[in-house]
Image (tube, rainbow, N blue to C red):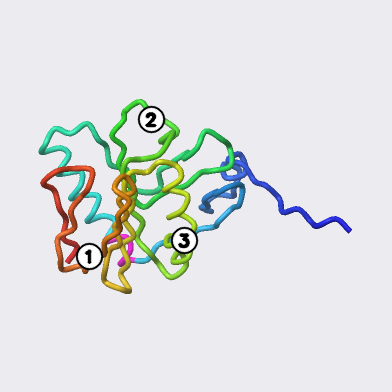
Amino acid sequence: MEALKEAIYTIENIYNLSEGKRAELIDGRIYYMAPPGTTHQKLVSRLNQKIANYIEMNGGNCEVFPAPFAVFLMEDDINYVEPDISIICEPSKIDEKGCHGAPDLVIEVVSESSRRMDYMIKLFKYRTAGVREYWIVDPKKQQTAVYNFERDMMDEYPFEKEIPVGIYENFSIRLQ
């Protein structure tokens, strides 16, 4: 008896979703996304603003993109994500469709529906794709887990503490 094979989806399937539906694609599996809540959006907005202001004030070549923003992590058609925030420091990776390759820093704000995805599936995928730094901002826990993949380090920061931004020197963010 032959085992049933699970369908493998592609980026074309993502682009063909009905209007208003959002999903990500990891290794050919579709993961539908629930609409974000108010706390989630406040955190994304605040982080985006602080990072964009820092880049602008310091003349950096990096760009910050809040979701929805397409990130084609690998050179294939079975991986497509929309991180809450993507910071990309190589302009050649960016075109009108989104980012082609791993962003330098990815920030995900956890919601109840995304907890497993952010802490497990995306953690592994971002690391293997070459993301330099990955933040998991968890409003329920009131803390941020920071994975610096270049240094093979992970630290946790309560919202009231300064979080150093590893891809920059002398830049930190306090969420509370």
Q: Do the residues labelled 1 and 3 touch (CB within 8 Å)?
A: no
Above or below 123: residue 170? above
Left or right: 24 with respect to 172? Answer: right
| Residue projecting furthest to the front | 152
Residue for point 30% across, 69% down: 139
Q: Position of residue 60 (x, y in %)?
A: 18, 34
Residue for point 72% across, 54% down: 6
> Which residue lies under the disc numbered 3?
120
Q: Where is residue 126 in the image (x, y as percent from the top left)?
A: 42, 48
> Which residue lies under the disc numbered 2?
93
Q: Position of residue 125 (x, y in %)?
A: 47, 49
Specify start and end residues of the magenta stretch as a single range: 38-42
Ranked by sequence position, the earlier of labels 2 and 3 is: 2
> Which residue lies under the disc numbered 1?
157
Left or right: 152 with respect to 97? Answer: left
Q: How crowded is mark 2: few (under 14 residues within 10 Å), some or many (20 or more)?
A: some
Ranked by sequence position, the earlier of labels 1 and 3 is: 3
The amino acid at mark 1 is Tyr
Q: Residues within 10 Å of mark 3 (few under 14, many from 20)?
A: few
User: How far apart are labels 1 and 3 at the CA level?
Assistant: 19 Å
Q: Are marks 2 and 3 in contact (CB under 8 Å)?
A: no
Above or below 18: residue 97? above
Q: What element carries label 1?
A: strand
Above or below 56: residue 43? below
Q: Where is residue 154 in the image (x, y as percent from the top left)?
A: 30, 58
Left or right: 174 with respect to 6? Answer: left
Residue for point 19% across, 62% down: 175
The answer to which quarter of the image holds residue 92 is top left
